[in-house]
Amino acid sequence: MTWQRCFHLIRLHLDTSRTLPTTAGKVIRQGEDFGRWVATHRHGWDQLTGVQQWMCAQVIGIGPADEGEKPKACTSQADKWAMPYPPPSTSSARYT
């Protein structure tokens, strides 16, 4: 139900000739952060149903995020343990 409510609020926002926010915190209506909703659904496109994907694409004009837009995956604890210690320095002169 929350998805439909926010979708409807965004559609009303667009019907008043306003632009669709893409960053969180820019437009908040009735407690819903439109930018956060758009970003969440673009990054989580595969979790949407086929109907929700169609509605997002055809009605409000958003699609899945490109690979360059997606946040970097978190490093697992196992990968952190496998990293060399100490991490390689970025400069040749650490102490002078």
Image (cartoon, rainbow, N blue to C red):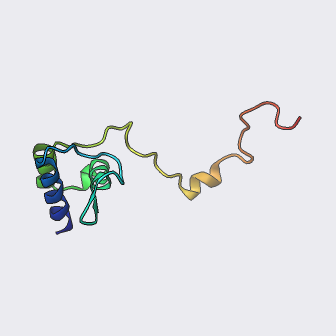
Tell me which residue sits at (71%, 34%) in the image.
Answer: 90
Query: x%, y% of residue 14?
Result: 15, 48
Tell me which residue sits at (17%, 52%) in the image.
Answer: 13
Up-down relation of residue 86 to residue 3 (above or below) = above
Along the line of sight, the residue nearer the viewer: 41 or 7: 7
Along the line of sight, the residue nearer the viewer: 91 or 62: 62
Furthest residue in direction bottom, as rendered: 1
Tell me which residue sits at (27%, 54%) in the image.
Answer: 34
Query: x%, y% of residue 82?
Result: 63, 50
Q: Locate residue 17 relative to residue 92 in the image: left or right.
A: left
Query: x%, y% of residue 79?
Result: 58, 51
Up-down relation of residue 92 to residue 34 (above or below) = above
Count of all numbered marks drawn on residues in the image: 0
Q: Locate residue 31 relative to residue 81 in the image: left or right.
A: left
Q: Locate residue 48 relative to residue 93 in the image: left or right.
A: left
Quadrant in which the C terminus appears = top right
Query: x%, y% of residue 23?
Result: 35, 47
Quadrant in which the N terminus appears = bottom left
